[in-house]
Image (cartoon, helix red, strand yellow):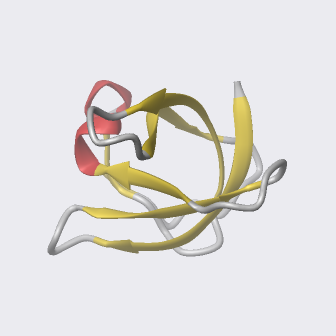
């Protein structure tokens, strides 16, 4: 499981990017990666853990995103 910080998340468009603790490239995150966690959106600067998956076009995406305890609680619950 990887960890990182939400760089930005656009609630209206339903996607954003996570800056991973390890690695240099930001990771794409779609709102669908949050559905099973009862989180509707992420907050900028929030600490998260996530799994990495490769999309069909070769990009890396975050899946199974979870908020790390003690992180900013500005996320929106479903």
Which quarter of the figure is the N terminus placed in?
A: top right
Q: Residue 52, percent across and down?
A: 55, 31
Q: Residue 35, percent across and down?
A: 25, 33
Q: Is 37 displayed left or right of 49 in the figure?
A: left
Q: Residue 5, percent across and down?
A: 68, 61
Q: From this viewpoint, is residue 19 visible?
A: yes
Q: Quadrant of residue 56?
A: top left
Q: Quadrant of residue 6?
A: bottom right
Q: Is 35 displayed left or right of 9 in the figure?
A: left
Q: Is 13 displayed left or right of 74 in the figure?
A: left
Q: Residue 9, percent across and down?
A: 39, 70
x 33%, y 34%: residue? 55
Q: Residue furthest front?
A: 58
Viewer-side residue, 77 vs 33: 33
34, above or below 1, in the image = below
Viewer-side residue, 27 vs 50: 27
């Amino acid at each position: 499981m990887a960890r990182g910080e939400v760089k930005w998340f656009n609630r209206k468009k339903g996607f954003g990017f996570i800056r991973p603790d390890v690695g240099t490239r930001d990771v794409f995150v779609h709102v669908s990666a949050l559905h099973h966690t009862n989180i509707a959106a992420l907050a900028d600067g929030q600490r998260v853990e996530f799994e990495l998956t490769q999309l069909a076009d070769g990009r890396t995406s975050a899946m199974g995103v979870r908020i790390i305890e003690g992180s900013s609680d500005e996320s929106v619950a479903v």
